[in-house]
Amino acid sequence: MPELPEVETVRRGLAPVLEGQRLASVRINRPNLRFPFVPRFVERLTGQRVDRLNRRAKYLIADLGSGEHLILHLGMSGRFVVEQIDETRQPGAFHQAIPRLAAHDHVVFETAAGARIVYNDPRRFGFMVLVEAGALCDHPLLAGLGIEPLSNDFHAGAIDRLFAGKAAPLKAALLDQRLIAGLGNIYVCEALHRAGLSPARPAGTLSGARRRAACARERLAGAIRDVLTEAVAAGGSSISDHARTDGSLGYFQHAFRVYDREGAPCPTPGCHGHIQRQVQSGRSTFSCIRCQK
DNA sequence: CGCATCCCCTGCCTGC
DNA sequence: TGCAGGCAGGGGATGC
């Protein structure tokens, strides 16, 4: 599921029920997701207050009252669903009375205020990692992450610097979380189409003083910012797994111009090409060879 | 180092 | 109808 817009959508759904609330109970239904849960994961979380829920790239980061942090990643198929539980029941008593667990409901949080937050992840590429106080910035999962594409630091000049000398195709460079953090397969394809840039073009050709390179990176920076902003406003893209925390679907998938549209006419005005699919770095790329150069 | 390939896991869709 | 194969939004480990 989740690229930056989907993760941000989940963050916005979870923040109102988590921030300022205590975790009255935590339950894990298996020993691992992508990684094994750390020892005493449940005990270390239970009773803690969540001060804030942040997002960095495709990670959610809960700041806990103890100074520790809980890093959450949704992998490919992870989702959170929030339900309001009967407030007359005793917190923590849901072990007996829990409503039916669906398949792949791996983690269940219950807040003192009566929200139940269920993490469901069929493929289990997601994970939850507890980080000691003060160790967040240096954590290996986060330390190497690149620039946030919706931050003020992201602009054509950043692309100029990051892509200088890179022989890798634009598709691969944009997927590289060490350069720009948060883009995934869908939004890379969409941004490249909007910018009129070929996914196969060497990333380094967007660097340097030449006017054409400067125009190209200007278009790319704008396209990335636009597509992500629009997708966040739409609640993300719901292909098969992503849903908002209230169960409703995002609708940005209806705005895709190229992703999963092989054979369709190119939506660029005046371009009479069609969308083709190719495989780059083992993953599908969708583009129009006519208007993406 | 930079880049490509493979792998983790389950579900769904297609074609035979 | 059943089954095999391919494919899926993630990232990490490996090998060249």
Image (cartoon, coloured by chain):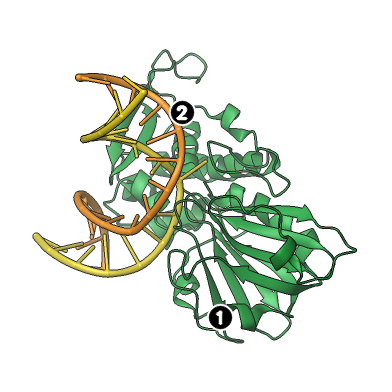
Chain colours: A green, B orange, C yellow
Q: Chain of mark 2?
A: A
For mark 1, give the secondary structure: strand
User: Who is closer to the viewer here, A115 or A135?
Assistant: A115
Identify the residue shown where x is 62% and y is 54%: A101
Q: Does A235 sit above or below residue A57?
A: above
Sequence-first tag of 2 and 1: 1
Q: Is residue A198 visible?
A: no
Q: Which mark is residue A131?
A: 1
- Measured as percent of width and height from the top left, residue A141 is found at 46, 71
Q: Chain of mark 1?
A: A
* Tags 2 and 1 both on a single chain: yes
Q: Which mark is residue A258?
A: 2
Q: Quadrant of the C terminus of chain A?
A: top left
Identify the residue shown where x is 58% and y is 44%: A242
Position of residue A292 in the picture relative to residue A130 (left or right): left
Position of residue A62 in the picture relative to residue A113 (left or right): left
Q: Does A209 sit above or below residue A116?
A: above
Q: Amino acid at mark 1?
A: Val
Would you call the spot at circle 2 few (<14 residues within 10 Å), some (14-19), or many (20 or more)?
A: many
Q: Amino acid at mark 2?
A: Val
Identify the residue shown where x is 55% and y is 42%: A241
- Measured as percent of width and height from the top left, residue B14 is found at 34, 22
Task: Give the distance between the C-alpha atoms of the residues marked 2 and 1, in whole angstroms.
Answer: 39 Å
